[in-house]
């Protein structure tokens, strides 16, 4: 059976979950909203701690946080938090451009230009180094059964190839 085409009321967030848009916010229980707030503010570092603090089981909180409606609320809250912090972050980058450290100043300027889509030109050359010397360290074992004196050394500066 073919899948129905996505209507304008449905959108696909970045994590691949398809969530239906609705005019009203999903109804979340007071305990769930409180647990989400504790996790978002960092008052509770783990889901288990947040669940214990609001008086619900860890398993139930974990299950609720996995629901599409709850994930949409979390995503909306995160987007709102980030959008309110953007002006502050932009001001900080601009301050760092005037830093006494040349490295910090260059990094801030490059970051700001990169945000605007201005990037340094990529070098059009490449360096390939090939080393065909295959010398390996280790022991040499005599498996020929001949005495060591009869075996020709592997590397001998005095050995003449033409003499053999």
Image: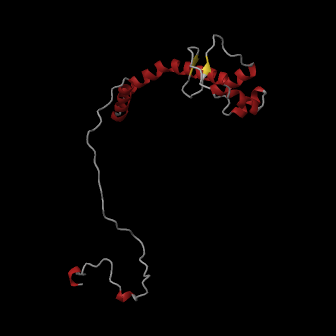
Residue 108 percent location from the top left of the image: 38, 29
How many numbered circles does the render carry?
0
Looking at the image, residue 40 sits to the left or right of residue 133; the answer is right
Q: Residue at x 57, y 28 (%)?
A: 16
Q: Quadrant of residue 162?
A: bottom left
Would residue 162 be found to the left or right of residue 79 on screen? left
User: Percent position (x, y) of residue 65?
Assistant: 68, 28
Q: Quadrant of the C terminus?
A: bottom left
**What colour scheme governs how the chains and residues are painted in the rendered image of this protein?**
secondary structure
Q: Quadrant of the N terminus?
A: top right
Query: Given the current orientation, which residue lies at the most extreme front position?
Result: 1
Nearer the observer, 79 or 128 = 128
Image spot of residue 34 (x, y percent): 71, 22
The quarter of the picture where residue 21 lies is top right
Q: Kindly give the residue lying farthest to the left in the view shown.
A: 162
Instruction: Using the rendered image of the protein, determine whether residue 98 is visible from the camera's viewpoint.
Output: no
Residue at (28% x, 45% y) in the render: 126
Give the residue displayed 51% in from the left and 19% down from the top.
83
Dividing the picture into quadrants, the one containing residue 44 is: top right
For the point 69% across and 32% down, which residue is it?
47
| Between 20 and 106, the one nearer to me in the picture | 20
Q: Position of residue 112 (x, y in %)?
A: 38, 25
Q: Is residue 107 visible?
A: yes
């Amino acid at each position: 059976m073919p899948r129905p085409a996505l209507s304008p009321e449905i959108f696909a967030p970045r994590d691949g979950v398809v969530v239906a848009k609705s005019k009203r916010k999903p109804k979340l229980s007071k305990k769930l909203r409180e647990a989400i707030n504790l996790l978002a503010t960092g008052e509770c570092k783990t889901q288990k701690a947040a669940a214990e603090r609001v008086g619900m089981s860890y398993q139930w909180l974990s299950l609720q946080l996995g629901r599409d409606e709850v994930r949409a609320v979390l995503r909306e809250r995160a987007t709102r938090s980030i959008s309110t912090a953007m002006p502050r972050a932009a001001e900080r980058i601009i301050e760092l451009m005037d830093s006494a450290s040349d490295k910090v100043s260059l990094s801030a300027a490059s970051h700001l230009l990169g945000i605007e889509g201005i990037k340094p030109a990529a070098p059009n050359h490449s360096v390939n180094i090939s080393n065909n010397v295959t010398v390996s360290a280790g022991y040499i074992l005599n498996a020929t059964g001949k005495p060591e004196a009869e075996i020709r050394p592997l590397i001998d500066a005095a050995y003449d190839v033409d003499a053999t």
